[in-house]
């Protein structure tokens, strides 16, 4: 060991990172039911793939689903075949992708600087609020962010060294990214590398890189076969559904009413980076110093492009900004030594926790001002689930974070990571189960009842794909007829006459219409 102190230190840091990944990504895989709409939709499409044995085209409730390419479904299918139909199996591929994502950050930063900075950057990624959630969600984004990070790191290494191996890895990772979520996997690397090349005065080098014949052949051999086979199977329905509706339309219009102002991602970024938001401001205040470094300029262009592009997009969803988080984690780790007031970083997570502590009171106020019966049922359920224990749990988390700041031998980085561990435990073992119990347990329990009793269900005025997963059946989306069983809400139940209530919880009802 003494002959290889560098290797020994690296192994220690990787082991520590592994422990953080285990607690943040893996231990919470079954802490909540599948969340609708996205987790339910991806999981049900995988379940229907397993039943139909059609491994080319995904279907949701019996209809073709062109939202995303095929790769994440293949990984989920393999996991479900190994571990069965459950939350762990559907979420495992994302947790594994999150592990590879964190590891790629560590290896990149270690090569650029040292083990300690690499550990801080990757640990912040693993423990930040949005990543704790997204890196184990049964959707495509964890895998995409992993592949995007590998693409960008390899691309920058090629710019620096001219390495053909790095260039080919760039094209290969982008090819798998294209199979994961489509054109965004090549748009971000192409745009960022172009802007970086212009800034560096190396446009000709960029042209040679982009049009490298071996790289293009590698990309095409990975990504193109499925697209060609899917077009052959589905024809123009695939082109219109995937490329036009789910890609072009998302930028041009507000897709599925997911809109927002041009400032939409500022609060998302502030909350999503918790509990490390303070370091984000350190980056902003020291931007001139950071930009003196070649790598930092590339990282900043990466983040700024993602932020501006999705701010201008007609469709806005909170997880889109995560495509620009990887460079931010690295810049934040590099900015820590420039911070003069690291003791102030704890103020941001403590303020957020103080707001969470007031949640029961906010719910009670909202309950008095809302007339919608479905929303009132949800709010009532929220008040029921956040009793006195809620305040005690949040206060305990605040006290833990405060106590961490007074540990004398703990460095600024150690305090940040320790605070992140507290946050991760709070999200995985309290907040996510809380949200799951309120929003998804009613759907899951109704579905399991339908499965047990063999009910054939109609879904009316609600859309919960997770119901298909748990009931292991499909449902027609229409108004119910006499004698049929319907999944709906308490609000819509009033519009149905002569019903027998089979199940009701937090606004979700399963009822049978009398003949």
Image (tube, helix red, strand yellow):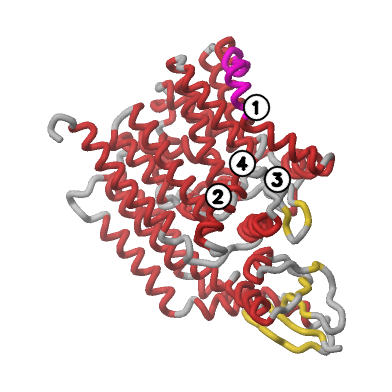
Asked whether 325 falls inside the magenta stretch, the response is no
Q: Secondary structure at mark 3?
A: loop
| Mark with earlier residue (1, 2) | 1
| Mark with earlier residue (4, 3) | 3
Residue identified by numbered label 2: 268
Q: Which residues are magenta?
A: 207-221
Where 71 sits versus 39, above or below?
Answer: above
Residue identified by numbered label 3: 56
Label 1 vs label 2, nearer the camera = 1
Q: Residue at x 50, y 26 (%)?
A: 169
Asked whether 220 falls inside the magenta stretch, the response is yes
Numbered tag placed on residue 220 in the rendering:
1
Q: CA distance from mark 4 to mark 3?
A: 14 Å
Q: Quadrant of the C terminus?
A: bottom right
Label 4 vs label 1, nearer the camera = 1
Q: Residues within 10 Å of mark 2 (few under 14, many from 20)?
A: some
């Amino acid at each position: 060991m003494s002959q290889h102190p560098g290797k020994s230190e690296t192994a220690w840091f990787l082991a520590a990172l592994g422990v953080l990944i285990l607690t943040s990504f893996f231990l919470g895989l079954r802490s909540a039911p599948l969340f609708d709409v996205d987790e339910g939709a991806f999981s049900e499409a995988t379940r229907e793939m397993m039943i139909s044995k059609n491994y080319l085209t995904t279907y949701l409730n019996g209809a073709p689903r062109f939202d995303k390419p095929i790769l994440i479904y293949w990984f989920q299918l393999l996991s479900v075949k190994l571990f069965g139909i459950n939350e762990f199996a559907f979420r495992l591929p994302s947790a594994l992708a999150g592990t590879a994502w964190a590891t790629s950050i560590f290896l990149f930063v270690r090569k650029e600087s040292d083990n300690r900075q690499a550990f801080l950057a990757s640990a912040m990624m693993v423990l930040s609020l949005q990543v704790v959630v997204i890196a184990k969600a049964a959707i495509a984004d964890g895998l995409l962010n992993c592949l995007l990070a590998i693409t960008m790191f390899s691309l920058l290494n090629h710019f620096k060294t001219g390495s053909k191996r790095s260039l080919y890895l760039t094209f290969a990772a982008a090819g798998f990214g294209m199979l994961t979520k489509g054109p965004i996997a090549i748009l971000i690397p192409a745009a960022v590398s172009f802007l970086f090349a212009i800034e560096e005065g190396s446009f000709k080098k960029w042209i040679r890189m982009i049009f490298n014949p071996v790289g293009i052949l590698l990309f095409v051999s990975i990504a193109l076969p499925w697209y060609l086979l899917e077009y052959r199977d589905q024809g123009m329905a695939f082109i219109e559904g995937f490329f036009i509706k789910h890609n072009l339309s998302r930028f041009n219009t507000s897709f599925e009413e997911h809109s927002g102002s041009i400032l939409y991602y500022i609060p998302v970024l502030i909350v999503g980076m918790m509990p490390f938001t303070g370091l984000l401001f350190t980056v902003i205040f020291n931007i001139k110093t950071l930009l003196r470094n070649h790598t930092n300029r590339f990282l900043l262009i990466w983040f700024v492009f993602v932020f501006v592009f999705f701010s201008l997009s007609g469709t806005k969803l909170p997880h889109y900004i995560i495509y620009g988080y990887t460079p931010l984690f690295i810049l934040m780790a590099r900015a820590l030594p420039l911070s003069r007031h690291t003791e102030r970083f704890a103020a941001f997570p403590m303020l957020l926790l103080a707001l969470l502590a007031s949640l029961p009171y906010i719910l009670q106020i909202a309950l008095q001002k809302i007339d919608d019966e479905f929303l009132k049922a949800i709010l009532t359920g929220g008040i029921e689930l956040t009793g006195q224990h809620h305040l005690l749990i949040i206060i305990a988390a605040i006290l833990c974070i405060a106590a961490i700041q007074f540990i004398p031998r703990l460095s600024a980085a150690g305090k940040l990571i320790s605070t992140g561990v507290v946050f991760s435990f709070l999200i995985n073992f309290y907040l996510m189960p809380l949200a799951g119990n309120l929003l998804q347990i009613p759907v899951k329990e109704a579905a399991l009842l339908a499965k047990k009793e063999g009910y054939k269900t109609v879904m009316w005025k609600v859309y919960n794909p997770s119901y298909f997963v748990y009931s292991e059946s499909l449902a027609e989306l229409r108004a119910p007829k006499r004698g049929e069983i319907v999944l709906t809400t308490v609000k819509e139940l009033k519009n149905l006459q002569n019903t027998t209530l089979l199940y009701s919880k937090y606004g979700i009802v399963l009822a049978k219409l009398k003949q």
